[in-house]
Amino acid sequence: MRQTRDMESARLLATLADEGALLAAAAQRAGTDAEIPTCPGWRMRDLLRHTGAVHRWAATLVAERHTARQPMTGGPKLDSTELISWYRDSHHRLVETLASAPPDVQVWTFHPAPVASPLTFWVRRQAHETAVHRVDAEGADGEAPVSGTSAIDADFAVDGIDELLRGFHARSTSRVRTETPSVLRVRATDADAVWTVRLSLGPPSTTAGEVADSDCELAGPADQLYLALWNRRPVPRIVGDESVAALWLASSAIG
């Protein structure tokens, strides 16, 4: 079991390393003044400052073994090539910190997604943070958000959907609430993965697997569904009560 957990962390860490490099490359191509259509109001400089600041915050939490939340500072007032270099350094610092941390390091985490350890939590969270923002960066000024070598692996996408549904939306801060209880099914059609999401006045309750009946299903290939659930593209297929889908899509954005 320990070997399996270590292999999982190693795969996620490799993905984090690749995604950060792709993000920086996209920023280099588009320039820091490029608009980010998937993040209305942002330009590339805003995305780099945000993502780099998150990287440094996570690296500090792990490196200094903080067991309580710490404040996160914003990115610097650098721009152009200096800002891109700062982002590359932030990303490198994060990867090196996570790679060198002991597997049993105790550090604060912020949602209850089922993972093996706090270190695995941070490797996983930063891999998905970076992947989604890499897609944002590659979509700057009309570039295709998913194509070629920058495509999202189906297994990684499934993991990200699981983190979003069973992690972020298990928190009391989830805004997906309804007076009319309903059941939403989320299905990755190319990965044999399905989740059942029960909606009510409380936070959504999600289990892996499906129930016999649901009010609505969101479905599609794992990579497309992953981006749709992160509000980066439309849901590939909606079946059933579209008002349930509309509720989810209108209130599930993560701030």
Image: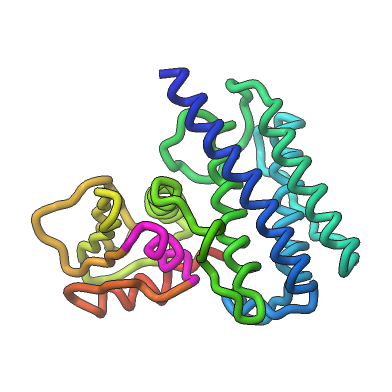
| Above or below 100: residue 95 | below
2 is within the stretch colored magenta: no
Q: Which residues are magenta?
A: 221-232
Which color mode does the image show? Answer: rainbow
Instruction: Locate residue 100, reporting x and y percent.
Output: 71, 26
Instruction: Locate residue 165, reporting x and y percent.
Output: 38, 54
Work out whether residue 219 can be spotted.
yes
Instruction: Locate residue 207, reporting x and y percent.
Output: 27, 47
Q: Magenta segment, principal secondary structure?
A: helix
225 is within the stretch colored magenta: yes
* Residue 182 figure quarter: bottom left
Query: In the visual, does 223 lie left or right of 145?
Result: left
Residue at image point 19% right, 76% down: 241
Work out whether residue 171 can be spotted.
no
| Above or below 35: residue 132 | above
Q: Residue furthest top?
A: 2
Query: Where does the N terminus fall, quadrant-wise?
Result: top left
Query: In the visual, does 76 lie left or right of 107?
Result: right
| Above or below 207: residue 65 | above
Residue at image point 54% right, 51% down: 128
* Residue 145 figure quarter: bottom right
Query: In the visual, does 110 lie left or right of 175?
Result: right
Q: Residue furthest front?
A: 148
Instruction: Locate residue 119, reporting x and y percent.
Output: 59, 31
Query: In the visual, does 231 lie left or right of 109?
Result: left
| Above or below 63: residue 24 | below
Residue at image point 54% right, 42% down: 124
Residue at image point 75% right, 52% down: 72
Q: Nearer the viewer, residue 224 or 60?
A: 224
Q: Give the mark count.
A: 0
